[in-house]
Amino acid sequence: MSSDRGDPTVLPLPASQAIVITLPRRLTALASVRARRRSTGTAGKILHMSEYRDTPPVDPIDSVDDPKRRLALRLARRDELAEQLAKVEEQVQADAAAARLAGMLAIEISEATGWSRNKTNYVLRNAGVAPDRSAPRKRQS
């Protein structure tokens, strides 16, 4: 027996035809991913390597031996991600302004985005959209 063999797997057959087959670990993992995809309706799509890999993916930057080069690569990745984040933040702000124009209340926008009311009002004012007025307070008698 090789070390690549996994645990015995029972195939879903009628009880009279049940067969026990020992599959390699990778095939067992792949079969479970495919079964999960069949049950969720995503069968037939190309599997990503991380879906049937036993170990988590390795970051290619970690394999760089030179510390200066590794630091430069990490800083470049950070800058790239910061750029992407800024673009997405602009899109979210534009979507929030469009939602306000469509009649969504500022408090609903705050809840949907997770922003404070001050941040929501700031974003809406910068977009040229007036935030809604708060409801009148009950008078204390």
Image: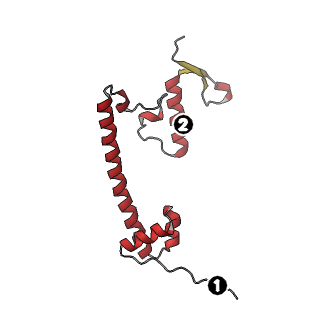
As rendered, which of 107 and 116 lies closer to the eye? 116
Looking at the image, which residue sits at the far top?
1
Tell me what residue is drawn at x 30 percent, y 42 percent: 76
As rendered, which of 78 and 97 lies closer to the eye? 78
Q: Is residue 140 above or below residue 125?
A: below
The type of residue carrying mark 2 is: Ala
Separation of residues labelled 1 and 2 (CA atoms) = 58 Å
Read off the residue under disc 2.
35
The type of residue carrying mark 1 is: Lys
Tell me what residue is drawn at x 32 percent, y 46 percent: 79
**Disc 1 element:** loop
Tell me what residue is drawn at x 37 percent, y 66 percent: 94
Query: x, y percentage for residue 6?
Result: 56, 20
Q: Is residue 139 above or below residue 6?
A: below
As rendered, which of 96 and 31 lies closer to the eye? 96
**Disc 2 element:** helix
